[in-house]
Amino acid sequence: MFRRVSSIMILDKILAQKRREIDALCQQAGPDIWRHQAQTCGRAIRDMRRELVRRELPAVIAEVKKASPSKGVLRVDFHPEAIAEEYETCGAAALSVLTDEQFFQSITGSLGRVKRRVSLPILRKDFIIDAVQVYESRTMGADCILLIAAALDAHTLSFLRREAEALGMQCLVEVHNEAELEMALGCGSRIIGINNRDLQTFSTSLDVTERLIGSVPDDVTVVSESGINSHEDMQRLADLGVDAVLIGESFMRAVSITSQFAFLQGAAAAAGSSESTRRERAKIKICGLQTLDDADAVNRSGADYAGFVFAPSRRQVTPGQAAAISERLADSVRRVGVFVNQPIDLVRDVVRECGLDVVQLHGDEEPLYCQNLRRLTDEDSDDRKSGLEVWKAVAVGAPETERDTQHSLTDYLPYIDGVLMDSWDPQLRGGSGQVFKWERGKIMTHNLAGNVTRILAGGLNETNVVAALRSMNPAVIDVSSGVETDGRKDAEKIQRFVAKVREFHESECRL
């Protein structure tokens, strides 16, 4: 008669394999050498606990996992870096990367490659029972490691936690019951993962989190793991006070990770809740026009804005070139000029020569600059609503904006009509093709008045624009490199991008 193997028996097999792997590591180099390598590897460490902040719903630690010993292969089309990038785009707070190769079919070196592709903190999820594995984790690039209370005694747990923290890493200590929780807290654990899975029966129940969370001090971060499959689950855990959730199988089995992420966040329910809360159709800006053919492509696509770059850039055009292209554009297309730290008189002259409708400031222009620009341009129009608009770009993720962005935006608001969110790049002022963490953009702009236009830029293309619309609900979508081929605007890509936006809003209206 078939008898299901319990998680405890599987854990015993895994731990036996880990001891063999530890022996192999020690044959490569002694523990002291491993420790020295960890201390001197020079890899930057990201603060995972800081990112696990519950807002309306728990923060999400999204897991990169190909298979499990109990469920087999979860995702045949498994590309860790691409999955990680999609998680970041969706708004994950951190990533969990499985590194066990024999039982979970991890790909060698995947954690390091993922770390280089995203800006999120990385949890190394493995079965760590020896200090050598802690040192190895640091050299891999892990920011945090998983310590499973069921696999450790109190002395070893305390020792491994101290070794990890001495190297700058954090520890997520996973517990299943009251005894393990008591041990974890007694060992000084600051991040507790409550696993809702019964190790004997494989069944999952959020009742485990509900039962244990009351014994966790308020200053300890709580992560709920396993059995989280719906928005209702997320809401229940939020009501319990859970700070974050760790989700893997739900994402790995999904046809679309982006759609599953939105489903867990309640996007589908929110979209159809009422007529008054339905999304307005996002307008579309194609930026960086350089030729008459570009103007023709914009006209055929039905885009709402066309952008001309007047600052130093590979897309830079002269006012004369922009004026000629502008003449080719349909009357319905609004003209946007992009400037970076340029004299106000020059900006005003270009506005007049090219017939611009919007000035987009993409540099370090101060509020006083915007005030003076506003005053000069208002002199050219009796009615501000029919006159020139001013948009100010903010670099999401820039060190200086992380600290005080809301304050600086408040200073700008009397003099601008829109805030454009773009990716921070130390070398470029826009057009980098990089996607920023959308959750940060929402935090930066959530207090803006309703009359301030929100414009979303930064690495958008036809594959991620729907996710961007669901996550950010911007008034304007701004695309440049995402509709180019070999550095030039591609008419077919422009057409497909605009069609994606239109199709999304048509589907929303049918809900």
Image (cartoon, grey):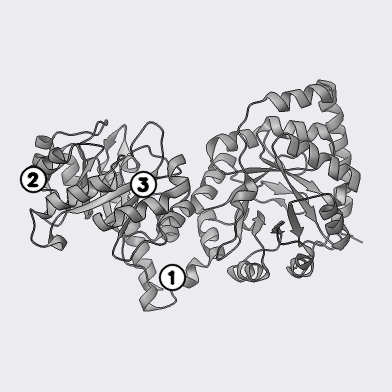
Dot 1 and dot 2 residues touching (CB under 8 Å): no
In the image, residue 274 sits, relative to residue 58, either above or below, namely: below
Residue placed at 74% from the left, 69% from the top?
Answer: 210
Crowding at dot 1, Cα within 10 Å, few <14 / some 14-19 / many 20+, comes out as: some
Q: CA separation, marks 2 and 3?
A: 26 Å
Q: As drawn, is 106 to the left or to the right of 460?
A: right
Residue at which label 3 appears: 394
Residue placed at 13% from the left, 51% from the top?
Answer: 377
In the image, residue 307 sits, relative to residue 60, either above or below, namely: above
Q: CA separation, marks 1 and 3?
A: 28 Å
Crowding at dot 3, Cα within 10 Å, few <14 / some 14-19 / many 20+, comes out as: many
Q: As drawn, is 422 to the left or to the right of 18?
A: left
Image x and y of residue 38, in percent: 72, 28
Crowding at dot 2, Cα within 10 Å, few <14 / some 14-19 / many 20+, comes out as: some
Residue at disc 2, secondary structure: helix
Residue at which label 2 appears: 352
Taking depth in this image into account, of 155 and 365 the one nearest to the observer is: 365
Q: CA separation, marks 1 and 2?
A: 41 Å
Image x and y of residue 64, in percent: 63, 46
Image x and y of residue 315, in percent: 24, 34
Residue at which label 1 appears: 271
Residue placed at 9% from the left, 41% from the top?
Answer: 349
